[in-house]
């Protein structure tokens, strides 16, 4: 089975539409999302509707949770974006949109995979140190060999083998094959809607569950349309549009 794994869409309908078109060209069986459907961007309602239709599994990102509840530990720019999203959903959304966000799980396990947003069930924490990675690997069950995450918006691959950690530079179109008898992988799939790896293209991953191969994909989209929309909305800071032009 071939899985497309996306993350951090952040209400960017232009990016999501381009990625879904690219996914369609790869004969993917299912799409999994690692959270942050909403936040930052101008089209939360449209993105939620697509998520409900297209995503077989979706994880609760910290921005999704903030919209459902309230923003905690956010700085002013994302906090204002959360409040704007909440107001938009209340005025123009359907109750089922918020119900969908509320229903998302913090962690999913199955078929040797772990799906998370941040560090396991903690969707606010970034994986920034080797201790974080060891925590993830230590909390994977014996039958689990790969954990997919998001949150930082930066693609990454870390491999644990014989209690040693190795970093592998993500490269588009390059196969990362897992020896499930000897290795465990942590893979950050990057971001669809707000890349932060100095590349304006959306990032996502295709995982072949039979061959145990991870492959990164990058997709161009018209970020200028998204940026212009953001700049026309009082509740969204212009910075959120400007950063799309640099992928930071």
Image (cartoon, grey):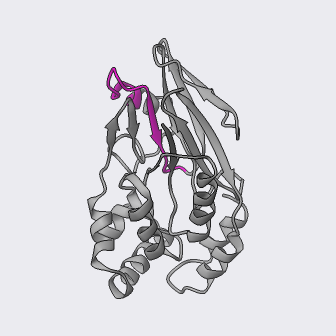
**Whether residue 50 can be seen here:** yes
229 left or right, relative to 55: right
In the rendered image, which quarter contains the C terminus?
Answer: bottom right
Residue at 44 percent of width and 59 percent of height: 54
Rendered location of residue 74, percent (x, y) = 42, 64
Q: Which residues are magenta?
A: 135-152
217 left or right, relative to 76: right
Outermost residue to the top: 162
Residue 230 vs 130, above or below: the answer is below
Rendered location of residue 190, percent (x, y) = 57, 48
**Whether residue 71 can be seen here:** no
Residue at 53 percent of width and 86 percent of height: 234
Outermost residue to the front: 27
What is the count of numbered marks? 0
170 left or right, relative to 206: right
| Image quarter of residue 240 | bottom right
Residue 232 vs 203, above or below: the answer is below
Based on the picture, tell me whether residue 174 belongs to the magenta stretch: no
Rendered location of residue 131, percent (x, y) = 44, 29
Rendered location of residue 73, percent (x, y) = 38, 60
Which residue is at the front of the view, 134 or 6? 6
Which residue is at the front of the view, 56 or 190? 56
Based on the picture, tell me whether residue 146 belongs to the magenta stretch: yes
Residue at 29 percent of width and 73 percent of height: 96
């Amino acid at each position: 089975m071939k899985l497309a794994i996306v993350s951090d869409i952040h209400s960017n309908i232009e990016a999501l539409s381009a990625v879904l078109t690219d996914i369609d060209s790869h004969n993917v069986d299912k799409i999994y999302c690692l959270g942050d459907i909403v936040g930052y961007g101008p089209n939360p309602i449209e993105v939620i509707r697509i998520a409900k239709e297209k995503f077989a599994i979706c994880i609760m990102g910290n921005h999704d949770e903030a919209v459902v509840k309230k923003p905690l530990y956010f700085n002013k720019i994302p906090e204002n974006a959360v409040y704007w999203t909440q107001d938009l959903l209340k005025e123009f959304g359907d109750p089922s949109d918020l119900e969908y966000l509320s229903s998302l799980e913090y962690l999913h396990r199955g078929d040797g995979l772990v799906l998370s947003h941040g560090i396991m069930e903690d969707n606010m924490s970034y994986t920034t140190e080797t201790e974080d990675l060891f925590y993830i690997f230590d909390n994977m069950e014996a039958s689990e060999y790969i954990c997919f995450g998001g949150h930082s918006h930066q693609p990454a691959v870390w491999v644990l083998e014989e209690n040693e950690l190795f970093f592998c530079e993500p490269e588009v179109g390059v196969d990362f094959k897992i020896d499930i008898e000897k290795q465990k992988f942590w893979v950050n799939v990057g971001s669809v809607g707000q890349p932060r790896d100095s590349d304006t293209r959306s990032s996502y991953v295709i995982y072949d569950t039979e061959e145990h191969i991870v492959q990164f994909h990058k997709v161009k989209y018209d970020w200028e349309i998204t940026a212009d929309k953001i700049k026309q909305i009082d509740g969204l800071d212009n910075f959120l549009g400007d950063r799309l032009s640099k992928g930071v």
